[in-house]
Image (cartoon, grey):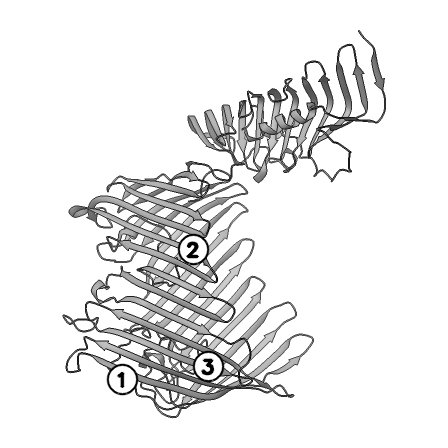
Amino acid sequence: MGEAGCVKGPRVARFHGVGALAGMCAGAALFAGAASAAEPLSKMLTPAPKAVAPQPDDGLKGGGFYLEADTLIQDDASHKVVAEGSVEARYQGRVLRADELDYQRDTGVVTARGHVVVVNADGTTQFAQSLTLDKDMSDGVAIGFSTRLQGNVKIAAARTNRQDANITELDRVIFTPCQVCAENGQKTPTWSIRARKVIEDKKRQTLYFQDAVVQVKGVGIFYLPAFYTADPSAPRKSGFQFPVVTISGSRGFSYEQPYYLVISPSADITISPQLNTKVNPFLNIDYRQRFYSGIMDIRAGVTDDQDFTSSGQKFGANTARSYILASGQFDLGSHWTWGFTAEQASDKLIFEKYSIPDVFTDRGLYAADGGRLISQLDAERQDQNSYLSIAAIDVEGLRPTDVQSTIPTVAPLIEAHYEPKDDILGGRLRIDGSAVVLTRDQSPTLDGLAGVDSRRATLGFDWQTNFTFADGLRVSPFVQGRGDLYNLSNLAAPLASNATIARAFGDVGADISYPLIRQTPDATWILEPLAQIAVGPVTKLDPRIPDEDSQVWQFDETNLFDVNRSPGYDLYEGGQSLTLAGRATVVLPDGSMGSLLVGRVLQAQRDLNAPLRTGLQTPLSDWIIGFDAQIAPRISLFSRWRLDSSNLTVNDMETGLDFASSRVSGSISYLQEVQSPTGGRVNSLDIHGEVWATKHWGLDVYSIVDGGTWRQNDIGLVYRDDCIRVEVLYRRNETFNGTLGPSSSVVLRLSLATLGNTR
């Protein structure tokens, strides 16, 4: 043997121009995308190292690395460097620790042994009993390998073999994102995948499993000879997502299998065929693409089948049945944006029959009423002082009572707002404009007659200032004015077929408030008298103008102090009025609070412009009561009441409770109101809650009671932990909707951390 040098005690070596440890760390890091082990995972995963503190400047340049150990031995005869005892090496943000490290200088082979730990710059960590890399520092073998990746994914393997820069093979593997900690008694993960072999393809960002068994609490429940999934570190990767399984009377056993396909860095598509035992398959597609200036999302579905009832009985002829739900929003620069929605369905009940989720959601600038689809094209301009929108709108009615020919097409609809930056005459000035064209084929009220086509242009202003006196009295004078110009055609006899109508409105008045505050050690009390005086001419609305935009008119505390409480333009509330109200608020030191508002409107004479159902037609309006309370940090209560002006009976009422704790959460709401515009009464109760009997097991409940009948009941048994949520849901629906009657179904919802979607 040749001469050897040996130094005991702490020693630091700095190497320059040597790529050994650099290659070793890089090679070890490339094992990170693999899968798991033959031994119990809790034994193979050593405790995660503490975060590496920022290291002082080592002066490493030219590809050098830093090496520190209790003992460094250099054997010139055998061209070998050995580091023993608390070995630590650092290179380009990576840290390697081991009990012993050998570097064969003539062959370039590096071997680390004993509690090998590699900590990468991104925080991911690899563990091994031993690690060996070849002379190029690119290929190698690890024994007893395990790793902890981003997202807390853990992988262990009895042996790994890195064949080249892209391919790594792992033998006898365990893969899991669940918590594993032997010290805390969590030796077995909630779910895991055990495989004979896993091949990691870095180029394709894919893990290929061979002879794989899906385990729940260590018990194998499903065997797959082969399958693949995305590498957990991949931000986007094509692959199968978790299926949606449903058993219902209408479709029988239904299995929907989504497949997610990455088309490009800015586009992807999800293809979801739905297979049913009672009816023909249904294909769902969701295409998304992001552009430099915006984003587009197109959902669509299609089948070819007969119609069917809630029991799955078919009738009628085979025909193509489809839907589309598309939207896009784009930036034009210089304060301008434009967007679109395209929503159409071949059948009114297609979404209910095939359980299509997230249908009636806001996708564009304007939203339709529930149970209706809206297609629109719009452009917007907005800056600090002004707003302008131009839109064209078409609505498709899917309600059983909807007659499509009576629903108008809106094109164009223009809305504008301008507010000068500086005060005008000592107050804030707002200028609003609006214009709309409505066309329809058939009258919604007179069968067989053509619908009224209307064109309206509106310009209005609102000026207000504020005076606050030393004693706290606040007076806010205001002036409002508006002018409308209508052009109508296809009016019904005996009226003239066409008409042009001009009208103007105006009001002056003041809002008055006088808050009184008292503080005590136990609470802060606020008593606030409120009043509004409004004076304007009594205007008789022209009966030739149809009510298109004010049919859903509610009178409550939100518009109690509006001069014109009509939600649209076609109706207007005018005349002279005095609004009186009082608000009392209490705030406790722990943040709990309650607030009560009581008020009503006094009018000089009856306002025949307001619908009778609003409670505003009589000189003394209905009483308005509003109550809000924060009972505890996670418990809140609200209640809204409208009491009849003559006998104090309840005309409208809504009460709700939201609550949450570690074991119980949910909401309860009750609604009683006069339905607009028909005048019929609605009584409904909504209940939604989750109750957790233990940390992991609970019940999910959702119920709707309408008119004394339980319209829908959902009850689900739920299991959850840090890496899985499983819910078996039973749903009973008592609603009659066209050809669909009462129905029952069972739905399986499953979410596994790191794999696929949540359905």
> What residue is at 65 percent from the left and 19 percent from the top?
132
Query: Mark 1 or mark 2, which has the lower sequence index?
Result: 2
Q: Amino acid at mark 1?
A: Asp
Check disc 1: other Cα within 10 Å, few if <14, some if 14-19, many if 20+: few
> Which residue bears the numbered disc 2?
330
The residue pinned by badge 3 equals 462
- Outermost residue on the right side: it is 8
Question: Could you say whether the residue bearing mark 1 is in a helix, strand or loop?
Answer: loop
Tag 2, which secondary structure? Answer: strand
What quarter of the picture does the N terminus occupy? top right
Nearest to viewer (mark 1 / mark 2):
2
Disc 2 versus disc 3: distance between alpha carbons?
Answer: 32 Å
Question: Which residue extends farthest front?
Answer: 334
The amino acid at mark 2 is Phe
* Position above or below: 300 against 98: below
Where residue 602 appears, as percent x and y from the top left, is 42, 89
Q: Residues within 10 Å of mark 2 (few under 14, many from 20)?
A: some
Mark 2 / mark 3, whichever is N-terminal:
2
Q: Secondary structure at mark 3?
A: strand
List x then y, in percent, for residue 115: 69, 25
Q: Farthest top residue? A: 1
Tell me residue 274's x, y (percent): 31, 41
**The C terminus is located in which quarter?**
top left
Q: Which residue is mark 1?
A: 542
Tell me: 109 left or right of 512: right
Question: From the viewer's perspective, is residue 187 above or below residue 603?
Answer: above
